[in-house]
Amino acid sequence: MRLNSHPQDVLVSRLYEANQDSIRDHFQRLDIRSRRARFCGAVSDGGILKYAQNIFRNDSIVCGASVDGQVRGIVELRGVFHSWPSTAEAAFSVELDWQNIGIGDALFERMFAMAQNRGVRTIQMMCLKGNSRMRHLATKHHALLRNDQDAVEAVLHPYWPTPASMAEEIVGEARSYAHRPFE
């Protein structure tokens, strides 16, 4: 259960293959509704295990939001290196007890800077129509929403890299490295 956490307690950092156990554990802690929202449908523990094992095979960059050393939220940016200028897909998940404290915003800002710094020209996010939190997050960050029968597609168009986007990523990663010995 969530402690008295605030956005400043959240550490967002890039995750690597060495973090696959943390990624798997995060996905397995998602309640049924959050799993359905993240994967746009039901997924079993076996499906979670397989997805976590293959997450880096999809040309993905993955960032995790940690509180007290435990991953509580993840953003995956897929397809970053397929073509140039690229189109990438972003997918978010935040554990139920850790929602509404700024984890989604923190993940969004890091994902957007990382996409921008890699020349991604279009970011697509898909969510179920009933996923009001994801729609709110996308709208808050000025995404164009397109409704389909059962889903909503959010589209963003990052600018070229800027000193601010480079600093966002560099400072964020430096902060996460500085905290690792204490976890």
Image (cartoon, helix red, strand yellow):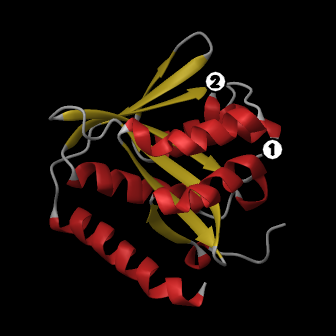
- In percent of width and height, residue 69 lies at 63, 76
Which circle, 2 or 1, is nearer the viewer? 1
Furthest-top residue in this view: 149
Above or below: residue 13 compared with residue 56: below
Q: CA distance from mark 2 to mark 1?
A: 18 Å
Instruction: Give me the residue at 74% from left, 26% from top.
Output: 42
Which x, y percent locates residue 94? 65, 52
> Looking at the figure, which quarter contains the N terminus?
bottom right
Residue marked by disc 2: 129
Disc 1 on helix, strand or loop? Answer: loop
Task: Give the answer, above or below, for where 147 lies relative to 109.
Answer: above
Query: In the depicted view, which residue is nearer to us: 156 or 10?
Result: 10
Residue at x 73%, y 35% (from the top left corner)? 46
For the question of whether residue 106 can be seen, the reply is no
Q: Which amino acid type corresponds to the residue marked 2 in the rendered image? A: Lys
Q: Which residue is mark 1?
A: 31
